[in-house]
Amino acid sequence: LLHADSGSAGSTGSTSSACGLLTSGGTESVLLAALSYRELGLQRGVATPRVLAANTCHPCIVKACHYFGMKLTKIKVDASTGFALTAAAVKRHITSDVVCLYASAPTFPHGVIDHVEDLGRLAESKGIGLHVDNCLGGILLSYLDSQNLTPGHQLWDFRAKGVTSI
């Protein structure tokens, strides 16, 4: 799903500024989001757009970057962050060719929720996209959130400011 802005359907009830695309699966969702970010980068004059992701990212973003001629920088996460991607780790890697941050909720190998709210604030401040991969985890996290069973984790979906695609 692609998101137009923070004042769209989910927060105001209006659908005038919302947009979206429903795909048949997680890899397709990531491929289409990556293609969208590449196109935005090319429109902005970025010859080879780049994506920043954790070294725990799902292989589909590697595939997407390969297919669409984008660079992928994998940022190491470790036990000091609970194996979550943080804005502090990402910030030092942001340059003018970065078009998207890629976060996971949850991560593919560990089931960890990246710090999506912090990443969203960073992405928004830099004028770049934030894609949240939560294909499998989205159903479970949505249910857990609806039952107030997820205290302490950051928002991970369009409720988090700066998230531009899921």
Image (cartoon, grey):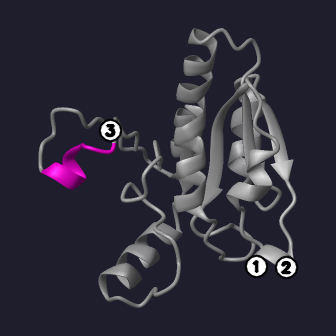
Q: Secondary structure at mark 3?
A: loop
> Which contiguous range is marked in magenta?
6-12
- Whether residue 91 is visible to the viewer of this picture, yes or no, is yes
Q: Quadrant of the N terminus?
A: top left
User: In this figure, which residue is indicated by the disc labeled 2?
Assistant: 79
User: In this figure, which residue is indicated by the disc labeled 3?
Assistant: 20
Residue lying at the far left of the rendered structure? 13
Left or right of 34? Residue 163 is left
| Residue 32, percent from left and from top | 53, 34
Q: Would residue 155 be counted in the magenta stretch? A: no
Circle 2/circle 1 CB separation < 8 Å: yes
Q: Of the residues shown, which amino acid type is indicated by label 2?
A: Ala
What residue sits 41% from the left and 72% below the top? Answer: 139
149 or 70: nearer the viewer: 149
Disc tally is 3
62 or 13: nearer the viewer: 13
